[in-house]
Structure formats: C-alpha cells, structure tokens
Image (cartoon, rainbow, N blue to C red):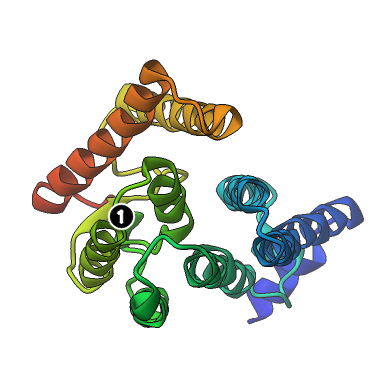
Amino acid sequence: MKQNNSLSSKVTIRQRFAGWLVHIFTASGAYVGILSLYAIYQNKYLTALWLMGIAIVIDAVDGLFARAIQIKLAVPRIDGALLDNIVDFFNYTIVPAFFLLVTELVPPDWRFFAVIIIVFSSAYQFTQVDAKTSDHFFKGFPSYWNIVVFYLFFWQMSQWTNLIILSVLAILSFVPIKYVYPSRLDYLAETNLPRLAMLVATICWGIATGALLWIYPASNHVLVSISMGYMILYAGISLYRTWTPLLIKN
C-alpha cells in the first residue's frame, strides 16, 4: 500500500488530467448508448446502428489510452475496468436487446425469449472471474450482440433463422472457447507480424462494415466479402488458439 501511495504521489497533474479524460471518454460510451436507444424508439434503425458502431470504436480505443498513461496510477480511486464493463454491458447487451424487442428480426411471440437469452448469457459472460483470460482472450462468446444485430438486419433472413442464430450464440457464451480480443493481441502469435496483420484486418473489417451500412439497402460484393471474410478469420484463429495456446510469459 505504501509503495502504491509513493508511486501515486509521483504522478503529475497532467497525467491525472489525462487519466480523468480517459475515464470520461469511456463513460461517454454510455451516453452514445442512450442515443442509440432513443433512435431505436424513434424507429431510426440505421441511425441506431451507426451509434452502436461509434460505441464499439470508443470501446476499442479507450483501453489503449488507459494503458498508455498507466491509468491505475494516474487515477487510483476509479476502477476503470469496472466502468468499462458497465458501459460494455449496456452497449453490447441492453441496446441490441432493445433493438430486437422493437424490430421484426425475430418472431413476435419469441422476442422476449430472445431478449432473455441474450441478457442472461451476457450476465454470465461478463461476471466470470476469467471472462478475460490471462493470455488476453475472451472466454465464451464475448456478447458481441450489437454486431450480431447489424448482420441480422443487413442479411434480412427469416425470423426463425435469426432466432436460431441468437440461440446458438447464447449457448456459446457458456462454452469455454477462447475468442480473440482485437485490442489485446499479445498472445495471438509469437511474432509481431501476425499481430499487426490481425489489427489491420480488424480495421479493414470496420471500414467495410461501416461502408455496407452507409450504402444500405444497396450492397457490394467486395465489402460483403471483406466483412464476412474477417468473421471467418476471427472464428478460425479463435478456435486455433483455443486448441493450441501460446505459453504465457512470466
């Protein structure tokens, strides 16, 4: 404790200010989530999906900022991980659950069932002690429900097909498969080149998926191929690293 107090006393005012800015940035994701709910309530579904995308971007980069400034030292009285989890549960679970409740993506009589399985499976996934493994992977399907509802909205499949997909993903939340954590690629590979390639692929996926949303209801085969190709790559690498994990460095 004395050592932590000593380190905290050496933090500059600039570092503390930067730390608070990062926490505010993380918390802003919840405000974006509120705007998403409001857009869904107004039946502005494309706007809601754009806002969900903004929330994903905030979540993707806030951890990088936090680690860069050593936020636990800069603002020791705030639990950044807890704040991040609260905002993520809201944006990745509650907002897309409401999206499913309001839209016609699943059969009308099964909408509450869809919401229940999403919320309960996510509650389990978020509260596991090792929800994020020591080698920086998610354990179990990582509640990417906002991404799921985008694809269900874009694909325009049957309501029953959508319900089956949602049910399978909810079950996968309880299956201890490791899923790639796109912003923490330390144990993805032994060298930097595959990690950089995965990062670039993730960025390309984001751009392609955003472009698909921009041109909706039109489509583009190249953009669809990039978006879906990344999903296949993500699933393949996740399964591979589940079965053949790298040794954790001491």
Can you see residue 64? Answer: no
Q: Give the residue drawn at x 68%, y 48%.
A: 47
Instruction: Indicate the secondary structure of the residue bearing disc 1.
Output: loop
Q: Which residue is mark 1?
A: 135
Q: Give the residue drawn at x 36%, y 80%.
A: 109
Left or right: 216 as drawn, with respect to 221: right
- Image x and y of residue 45, in percent: 61, 52
Most extreme residue toward the top is 222
Can you see residue 221? Answer: yes
- Image x and y of residue 41, in percent: 68, 67
Q: Residue 85 versus residue 167: which sits nearer the camera?
A: 167
Question: Quarter holding the N terminus?
Answer: bottom right
User: Residue 194 occupies which quadrant of the picture?
Assistant: top left
Left or right: 34 as drawn, with respect to 98: right
Question: Quarter holding the C terminus?
Answer: bottom left
- Image x and y of residue 19, in percent: 77, 58
